Image (tube, rainbow, N blue to C red):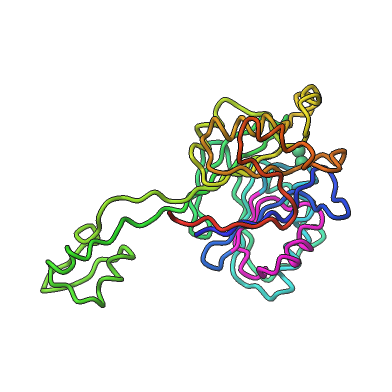
Amino acid sequence: MIDVCLLGTGGMMPLPGRWLSSVLVRVQGRLLLLDCGEGTQISLKQVGWGFKPLDAICISHYHADHVAGLVGMLLMLANSDRTEEVSLYGPVGLAAVVEGQRRIAPCLPYPLRCAELRGGETFEAIGLRAQVLAADHGIPCLAYRFDLPRAPRFAPERAEALGLPRELWKLLQQGQTVQWGGRRVEPGEVLGEERAGLALGYVTDTRPTPAMPAFFHEVDLLICEGTYGDDSQLDRAQERKHMTFSEAARLARQAQARRLWLTHFSPSLERPRDYLEQATREFPGAVVGEDHLQTTLRFP
Ligand SMILES: [Zn+2]
Ligand SMILES: [Zn+2]
């Protein structure tokens, strides 16, 4: 399963009661952070999932509202006596941004790894298979998709037919090869049909692009920016390379996403929920995100 929490839902600047857009993801006790604006470390502490197991930070792009909190986050991890490596992911330019921020945090007690990504590239973090797609925001910006594969069903009748003792079942189920009866038994011999995994999508600070529906095809949860609530602000959304609620909802529908959470609200949007209907017209289950909204994605 994948736990997901919105640490913040604001764009541009943190407001009293609304932190900057950021998402915390947890898989088997390990944490991954999506975007890290000013104050994200405070919201992270409020949620209470801990911070020491934070293994990876993925940045969408280098506007301050998505990255200005990085140095503080790295220092907080340093204060937690972390010694394990931390991985940073982001579009081209990451090394320069990190180098600039590290001028005021030169000594960290853990290795820091930076991976600059281009659309189409993949990586693995906290047990998730990640993929990025180039977004359309005027500067390099990435959308992220995370997949948690599920092991095929275990077929006990096959294990019994081979006479395998039960203590070996679990190892095979985990994908390990075992020795039994003087030979190697491969996991494929006792596994049944493939099963669908879980998928999470995150996209902010972009216009919708033609590649996005396929990229987010059938994700269990799409977290998508909706900087502007009302369609009357479409001109502004186009000019500043953002989306309106209805555009975000249309993307979720085209992608056949199972759920949609909106985030990254303009500071001018005092009560984002007033515009919910703009989204539900396109995607009936749309949810207007709020800070610390949480869910657990589970295998069916
Ligand atoms: Zn932003
Ligand atoms: Zn931006």
Q: Which residue appears at 80% of the width and 24% of the height?
A: 232
Q: Is residue 64 magenta?
A: no
Q: Which residues are magenta?
A: 31-58
Tell me if 16 is positioned left or right of 58 in this view.
right
Residue found farthest to the top: 235
Q: Which residue appears at 31% of the width and 62% of the height?
A: 175
Q: Image quadrant of residue 26?
A: bottom right
Percent across and percent down for residue 230 are 78, 30
Q: Nearer the viewer, residue 189 or 275?
A: 275
Q: Is residue 33 magenta?
A: yes
Q: Which residue appears at 84% of the width and 39% of the height?
A: 269
Percent across and percent down for residue 173 are 30, 65
Percent across and percent down for residue 177 are 25, 66
Tell me if 116 is positioned left or right of 47 in this view.
left
Q: Which residue appears at 53% of the width and 39% of the height?
A: 257
Q: Image quadrant of residue 207?
A: top right
- Report the number of discs: 0
Percent across and percent down for residue 300 are 43, 54
Tell me if 20 is positioned left or right of 6 in this view.
right
Q: Image quadrant of residue 183?
A: bottom left
Q: Nearer the viewer, residue 173 or 177?
A: 173
Q: Nearer the viewer, residue 217 or 288?
A: 288
Tell me if 228 is positioned left or right of 5 in this view.
right
Vertical relation: 89 (above or below) 174 = above
Ligand 1 in which quarter: top right
Vertical relation: 206 (above or below) 40 = above
